Amino acid sequence: MPRGLFITLEGLDGSGKTTQIKRLAAWLKNRGPEQPGAPGLASETWESTNLVLTRQPGGTPTGDRIRALLLDSRSTGLAPMAEMALMFADRAQAIAEVIQPALDQGKIVLCDRFTDSTEAYQGGGRELGSEPVLELHRLLCANLQPDLTLLLLPSLEASLDRARRRNERASAQTGQNENRFEQEQDAFYRRVWQKYHEIAAREPARIVLIEGDLTIDEVHEKIVAAVSARLLTASRTT
Ligand code: TYD
């Protein structure tokens, strides 16, 4: 059984990631080898392939509890090392419970954020550096690497603006308080942003960087092009 395909989406809060992951999931579900001209998996592979959509932090019952702890702005005074450890606890659980089993079954796993987020937010934003993040990833996540990472980096100002407005709306509507990160200062997000750029420059084979203030359709087209190319390679090697 060939290993499935592991695709992650990354970016700042408010980068449009959630919209794009939904559109990509719909595109993946609606396309198949029967569509004329659609590059993709060989039909035998596609038929046995389902899509698993997940996110971090969260995505498992335990992970959802860790997520609540991490994102609630009442979690005051959380030490950066504790924050990083919780991100990895969540991830180790998600890999064991959801990601690895799905990949072993040959499925496509679409994950909203993965270890690049920890490197950017805790390594960059919280200034813990890349090394402890990469080391913990080796130790706790068996160094599992995505086959493809789509990194959305519209301008810092546009992202922050969108994220803050979205959070005000969400907490007014649901009463849920998930804005611990959005309360950070711009300098924090500038460091996150820089670290994302650094990661993209270090790993050009894995990461497709989609920059600039593009429309939702333009970003979707770029994502589809990158995923199609990756699927084509996967179908050639299976
Ligand atoms: P979420 O509401 O999922 O934001 P978004 O829709 O922008 O992805 O919140 C996730 C928050 O957690 C986000 O601010 C980034 C942060 N985060 C980290 O700091 N480190 C990590 O390892 C992960 C996965 C997320």
Image: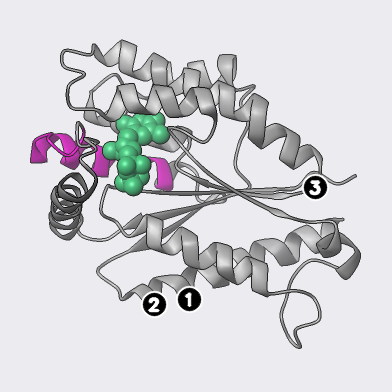
Amino acid carrying mark 1 in the image: Glu
Crowding at dot 1, Cα within 10 Å, few <14 / some 14-19 / many 20+, comes out as few
| Residue stretch rendered in magenta on the structure | 181-200
Cα–Cα gap, marks 1 and 3: 25 Å
Question: Which residue sits at x=80%, y=76%?
Answer: 33
Counting residues from the start of the chain, the first of labels 2 and 3 encountered is: 3
The amino acid sitting under disc 3 is Gly
Q: Secondary structure at mark 2?
A: helix
Q: Is residue 153 positioned above or below 139 on the image?
A: below
Q: Are marks 2 and 1 in contact (CB under 8 Å)?
A: yes
Q: Nearer the viewer, residue 112 or 62?
A: 62
Image quarter where the N terminus lies is top right
| Distance CA(mark 2)–CA(mark 3) | 30 Å
Regarding residue 119, the answer to whether it shows in the image is: no
- Residue carrying label 2: 218
Quadrant position of ligand 1: top left
* 230 relative position to 127: left or right: right
Look at mark 1 in the image and give the residue it sits on: 221
| Residue situated furthest front in the rendering | 174
Image coordinates for residue 183, horizontal then vertical, percent: 12, 35
As measured in the structure, the alpha-carbon distance from the residue carrying label 2 to the one carrying label 1 is 5 Å
Amino acid beneath label 2: Glu
**SS of the residue under disc 1:** helix
Is 182 one of the magenta-colored residues?
Answer: yes
Residue 58: where, in percent of width, then height?
46, 33
Query: Which SS type dominates the magenta stretch?
Result: helix
| Mark identifier at residue 106 | 3
Q: Residues within 10 Å of mark 2 (few under 14, many from 20)?
A: few
For this view, does 221 lie left or right of residue 168?
right
Residue projecting furthest to the bottom = 36
Which of 134 and 89 lies nearest the eye of the viewer?
Answer: 89
**In front here: 30 or 5?**
30
